[in-house]
Image: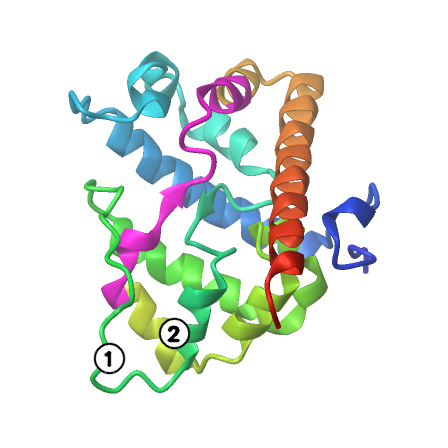
Amino acid sequence: MDKIVQDSPDNWEQTWPCEETLGTLAELNAQCLELMTEQALLRAPNAPPMFREIVDLWSRLDVASRRRAARCPYLLVDAGFADPYRWRWVGGDRVGDREPVSYTAFFTASGATKLAHQVFTNAWYIARTQRQGTPLYLGMPVHCAGLLAACTISQVGELGNQHAGWLRPRWAGRVRIWRELLLAAISGEGSRLEVARLHGVQLLAMELKALEQVYAKQPR
């Protein structure tokens, strides 16, 4: 089984994850893209740039192109996966405790709660079975994956019911990377798709490297 050799994003090898995980991510990403398309086509005046500026591309994303865009080796949504405080709170003794920070829901389209259940459940499974791969699969540092893996299945189910508002498109503020991915998926050109996917991997690596530097400076 292919894997990421070391925890640091600096040491990612150019090997792709196992086929089973790729299949799971593709299914999840297809659902994510379907929800994003629904959100974009609401054409809300206050929609973020990734929807407002390229709504024409979202409207052209049919089933076939959505499947092509979905085949990335990483999850196309984030749920605060790099936030250790969030996952420590999820797995802790929270009787009577409120969530430390209130999160405004990004998605107003229907289906967000159903997707949240799928995202949290599969992220938990990946964290428990392939922890060293979570930086690539989820954009989640290994120590955060350990916190998520320690949660019970009932705690994970509670997340889906109560915290769909944690879901965000990955790189919601980077219109360029979404334009690149959608154009490649619509065109169906394999080389363009590979370049778009690789840009995502590189961006994840840079983000995680920056996070590791921050964590390294914090007192233990």
Q: Is residue 123 left or right of residue 120?
A: right
Q: Is residue 122 left or right of residue 216?
A: left
Q: Which residues are magenta?
A: 161-181
- The picture places residue 207, in percent across and down from the top left corner, at 60, 41
Closer to the N terminus: mark 1 or mark 2? 2
At 45% from the left and 74% from the top, the residue drawn is 88
User: Which residue type does callout 1 highlight?
Assistant: Asp
- The picture places residue 152, in percent across and down from the top left corner, at 44, 82
Q: Name the residue carrying label 2.
A: 89
- The picture places residue 64, in percent across and down from the top left corner, at 48, 27
207 lies above or below 143: above
Q: Is residue 169 magenta?
A: yes
Using the image as rendered, state which of residue 196 and residue 213 is in the foreground. Answer: 213
**Does residue 112 appear anywhere in the picture?**
yes
- The picture places residue 167, in percent across and down from the top left corner, at 35, 49
Secondary-structure class at tag 2: helix
Q: Name the residue carrying label 1.
A: 97
The residue most toward the left is 45
